[in-house]
Image (cartoon, rainbow, N blue to C red):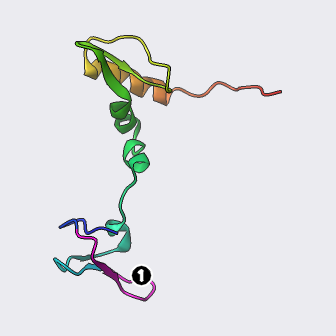
Amino acid sequence: MKCPKCGSEHISQERRIDGDAICMDCHHRGKPEEFRQKTNFEKMTASPEALAEEMVFEAIKGIWRYRIGEKISMQAFRSRWEAERDAVEYLKQEVENEQHS
């Protein structure tokens, strides 16, 4: 756990149902959920827009792409904004039914 106000990891939690978490350094008090650290996965998957932002990279100067897998990147775009917009559209597409044998 980490204090959302000062960043301290010196946190105490009340021992009762619905007990608050308290920062022992700055004395900030709040619900435990507020003190739980987000993982990189949670940050990147908060929304299609957040994930798209993490997927986009500059392949060469002035050419932007977004990565779907380790070796798959989509067409080139002239701006990061265009690449992110296209990545969001891709992420919002419905998955086609796949038939497995």
**Residue 44, percent from left and from top:** 39, 42
Q: Nearer the viewer, residue 19 or 74?
A: 74
The answer to whether residue 24 is seen in the rendering is yes
Q: Is residue 99 left or right of residue 37?
A: right
Regarding mark 1 in the picture, which secondary structure is present there?
Answer: loop
Q: Position of residue 45 (x, y in %)?
A: 42, 43
Q: Position of residue 99 (x, y in %)?
A: 77, 25
Quarter of the image where one finds residue 56: top left
Residue 92 versus residue 76: which sits nearer the camera?
Answer: 76
Give the residue at x 71% y 26%: 98
**Location of residue 55 with respect to 62 vertically, above or below:** below
Residue 21: in sight, yes or no? no
Residue found 69% across the figure and 26% down from its top: 97
- The vertical placement of 17 against 72, above or below, is below
In the image, what residue occupies the spot 45% across and 18% down? 73
For residue 83, above or below residue 15: above
Pick the quarter of the image with the C terminus: top right
Task: Give the residue furthest to the right.
Answer: 101
Q: Residues within 10 Å of mark 1 (few under 14, many from 20)?
A: few
Q: Name the residue that disc number 1 marks.
A: 18
Indicate whether 22 appears above or below 74. Answer: below
Residue 77 x, y percent position in the rendering? 32, 12
**Could you tell whether 2 is left or right of 5 in the image?**
right
What span is colored magenta in the figure?
Answer: 8-20
Residue 47 lies in quadrant: top left
User: Which quadrant of the rendered structure holds the N terminus?
Assistant: bottom left
Please, what is the three-letter code of the amino acid marked with disc 1? Asp
| Magenta residues, dominant SS class | loop
User: Does 66 lie within the magenta span?
Assistant: no
State the residue in front, 90 or 6.
Answer: 6
Q: Residue shown at 47%/24% (left/top)?
A: 90
